[in-house]
Image (cartoon, helix red, strand yellow):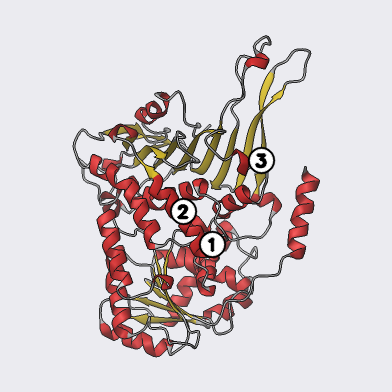
Amino acid sequence: MDGIIASASSEIEGSSPPPRRAPPCVFVIFGGGGDLTKRLLVPAIYNLACAGLLDEGFSIVAVDWADLSDEVLRAQFNEALQEFVARRGTAATTLREDMWTWLSSRISYLRGSFEEASTYAALSERIGSGNAVFYLAVAARFFGAISDRLGESGLVTEANGNGTFRRVIVEKPFGHDLQSARELNRRLLGVLRERQIYRIDHYLGKETVQNILALRFSNGFFEPLWNRQNIDHVQITAAETVGVERRGRFYEGTGALRDMVPNHLMQLLAMTAMEAPVSFDADAVRDEKSKVLKAAHCVGADDVVRGQYVAGMLGGEDVPAYRDEPDVAPDSQTETYVAMKLAVDNWRWAGVPFYLRTGKRLAERRTEIAIHFRHAPYALFRDTPVERLTPNIMTMHIQPTEGVTLQFGAKVPGPTVRLGGVRMKFDYSEWFSDGPSTGYETLIYDCLIGDATLFQRADNIEAGWQVVQPALDWGAHVGAAPLCAYAAGSSGPVEADALLARDGRHWLALGA
């Protein structure tokens, strides 16, 4: 098997043309002095530079309100990059000074308010008439105002016929419910064309998420099994060990349901359950995602479990309760955990439940999609010592490791027929030494070249909220979806276990 995989890998590398270099562009970051820019955006852009994918005409303009100079901002970015390279590794094991010199000479700072016309007049002088991408790395309350000002200033007007582009990348959260998502879409589309809007979800930049389509549609032995006749159920998990950190004020108005489900988990569900698109054209892929999300629904309030962590032990240390975290109300009803059972009412998935869970302060950091196949008939083994058959599970690991595991049964050596569970695992880090390090490289590059496949369209966003909105409504009514306690460092509330147990199923263990 190793030889086959290595051979196939070498064949692909040898025959595939290298990615084309992105066109010249001014990359404007609103919130350019913030944490997201330093931790993820600048390292991603640095990696693209190291890969030779940025044009000589590429530059960055960071826009923020803080009193900074070009030199101070560059020093902050350099410090963040040094830390990133030391902690996670990039295209080189140490910071490449030649690449940093190249990139830093193209970084400038513009101080100004996101809502004042003077900021956009100054920005227009910096950009000129060439290509520009505007990245909204700001609080969601500024999304509408910035897009309005960009429209009023003419900065997102594309000249007809000369190929110049103006694009806007919008970070999450995209709305806080279905109504607000629709309103934000309406506001953006009042200024921009849909093809100019890139609604980003960094989960879609992860290699394993993109690999879902490759696994399903490029391998003849997966797709024939990918249906209700062969799959018993699907589990999608996004578990975190961290708490709310210093984001208590933000999290109080958001919660696990709004923060994770309509975007991250709905996208994982859509990639897993979608039909084969007619091509990898952006709209062809997003059409199929939209169909799946419109077919998905939560049947009733008893299909939703909302939880909140109380004090516990994690990593050998005492962990405070959510209500004791900074900027959290002592009587908070905000959920830090949510589990849901969804149905996808279409021909492929009718009768196959999709179980979703996400939470903070859980036993293990893990994001994965587990496909549980139906058991083989037991009849052949009824006269042997075999008591039960090993579950057949295909798990796509998204973080912290990226790869795929297959679990199946095999005979234990010996004179009698005994079965043992075995696993085969493909790990990205073992087979592919180079690759994106932040999850943003692919997404930024795709926006620069105009490929919107991995970005969400307006109807995808609204369809995701459509699935979640009933759960938000039930949670707003006392008793409809009660708040369940779970200890920090555990696998979640026992009520989430009961959600599957009533169907004769159980979650894959966390922290095992």
* Residue wearing tag 1: 84
Secondary structure found at label 2: helix
- Rounded to the nearest whole Å, what is the CA distance between mark 2 and mark 3? 28 Å
Q: Amino acid at mark 1?
A: Phe
Quadrant where the N terminus lies? top right
Give residue 255's mark: none
* Front in this rendered view, residue 318 or 398: 398
| Residue positioned most to the front | 347
Secondary structure found at label 1: helix
Q: Amino acid at mark 2?
A: Lys
Give residue 289's mark: 2
Occupied quadrant, residue 483: top left
Contact? badges 1 and 2 (CB < 8 Å): no
Image spot of residue 474 (x, y percent): 24, 40
Compared across the picture, whether 384 is left or right of 54 comes to right
Contact? badges 2 and 3 (CB < 8 Å): no
Secondary structure found at label 3: strand
Give residue 425's mark: 3
Q: Amino acid at mark 3?
A: Lys
In the depicted structure, whether residue 495 falls above or below residue 227 = above
- Closer mark to the observer between disc 1 and disc 2: 2
Residue 213 is at least partly visible in this image = yes
| Residue positioned most to the top | 383
- Mark 2, Cα crowd under 10 Å, few <14 / some 14-19 / many 20+, is many
> Which comes before the other along the chain, label 2 or label 3?
2
Residue under the image location 62 percent in, 71 percent down = 50
- Rounded to the nearest whole Å, what is the CA distance between mark 1 and mark 2? 34 Å
Image spot of residue 442 (x, y percent): 55, 64
Image spot of residue 420 (x, y percent): 67, 23
- Closer mark to the observer between disc 2 and disc 3: 2
